[in-house]
Image (tube, helix red, strand yellow):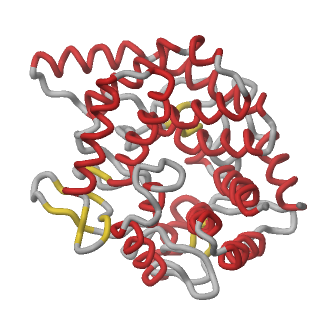
Amino acid sequence: MKLYDTSINIILKYQSKYGSYVASPNFRQYQYCWIRDGVFIAYAMDLAGYYGSSRRFHEWVAKVVERYSWKVKRLVEKLERGECRGQSEYLHTRYTLEGFESSGQWPNKQFDGYGAWLWGLAEHVKLAGEEHLLDTYRNQIKLVVEYLTRFWSESCYDCWEENPDKIHTSTLACIAGGLNSVNKYLKDGEVANTVDKITSFMASKCVVGERFAKYYDPQADTAAGLDSSLLWLVYPFKVFKADDPLFRHTVASIEEKLLEPEGGVHRYPEDTYYGGGEWIILTAWLAWHYAENNRGEDAIKLLKWIESTADNQGNLPEQVSHHLLAPQYYEYWVEKWGPVAKPLLWSHAMYIILYEKIQP
């Protein structure tokens, strides 16, 4: 329970007065709030019973969506007129803690956070019993639904803020999962149809061999790559079932190529960011899969490994450097941006989520 309690305290400490969660307070590039990260932090707080913290985050997102609603309306108008749309015209992936776009350059065209928000809000409503929020944020929900319905098939940056010319399988999982979750309340036939289209696209285009691929390349009309974020297809977004052969083979590939035998989980085989270490959030995700599929001992083993990565103050990093995929790049990143981000609030959130999933 010690790291569990510490994780809650760290998240509460670094939730801003505006409701946003800073990604990492001690890492200059991460002193913003990513909607994607924040959704899972809020979900962790919901599972831990801190509904007020989660509610404040969702209020913050709703204000951000309202503030930049004009961008979606302009994008839709341009789409309908057949005009080109620049990447900066799309909703951003990260914001200042106050809820404004940041002025610096960043790979901001990412759809995953907005799909995840719909899912996270639906989970908060269910866990906290606050269905009135669906009415309170009805306009923002409808705007995000339209945004995702209109643009899901476009290429964008992935969850690691790379590969802008690809369509990413984990991003599609966020979108389909979010639309499906919120549509249990909206009951909109067009939204249901969009979810079916996305799911069919994933099953037909985002496959390599017998497993799901990291991305689909629309220019080459091919799919390629392996990435641990493919775990999102089932947990939490339930776009596919855990016993789907494509997903089972995906998990097997992640275990074979990205899971260290006595350690954690890497992002993808070609990773060079800080040398390509083992990520706490992805280790928790694989353990979540184990916990939901009668592999409790394997889940607990990974939970204990995560606990071993905390420092003396209980801070969890973004990744650890015990088994680097590309060690020659580690010093490059340290010199460029400083030590690995710590604490990373998303890491603490995933520890809380995993702890809750393992509990009988």
Residue at x 67%, y 72% (from the top left corner): 299
Q: Residue at x 42, y 18 (%)?
A: 142
Q: Quadrant of residue 179?
A: top left
Q: Is residue 348 left or right of residue 235?
A: right
* Picture coordinates of residue 154, whole percent (x, y): 23, 40
Question: Relative to residue 11, is residue 155 drawn left or right?
Answer: left
Residue shown at 58%/62% (left/top)? 285
Residue at the extreme right of the image, as rendered: 2
- Residue 194: name its quadrant: top left
In this view, 298 is above or below 63 = below
Quarter in which the C terminus is drawn: bottom right
Please provide percent x and percent y for residue 70: 37, 13
* Residue situated furthest bottom in the rendering: 261
- Mark yes or no: residue 202 visible: yes
Looking at this view, is 327 or 19 the one in front? 19
**Could you say which is closer to the camera, residue 202 or residue 305?**
202
- Which quarter of the figure is the N terminus placed in? bottom right
Residue 262 lies, in percent from the top left, at 64, 87
**In the visual, does 103 lie left or right of 89?**
right
**Between residues 57 and 85, which one lies in front from this camera angle?**
57
Q: Which residue shows up at 76% across the image and 40% down it?
A: 14
Image position of 270 with respect to 74: above or below: below
x then y, percent, for residue 172: 35, 46
Q: How many marks?
A: 0
Vertical order, 88 against 353 (above or below) = above
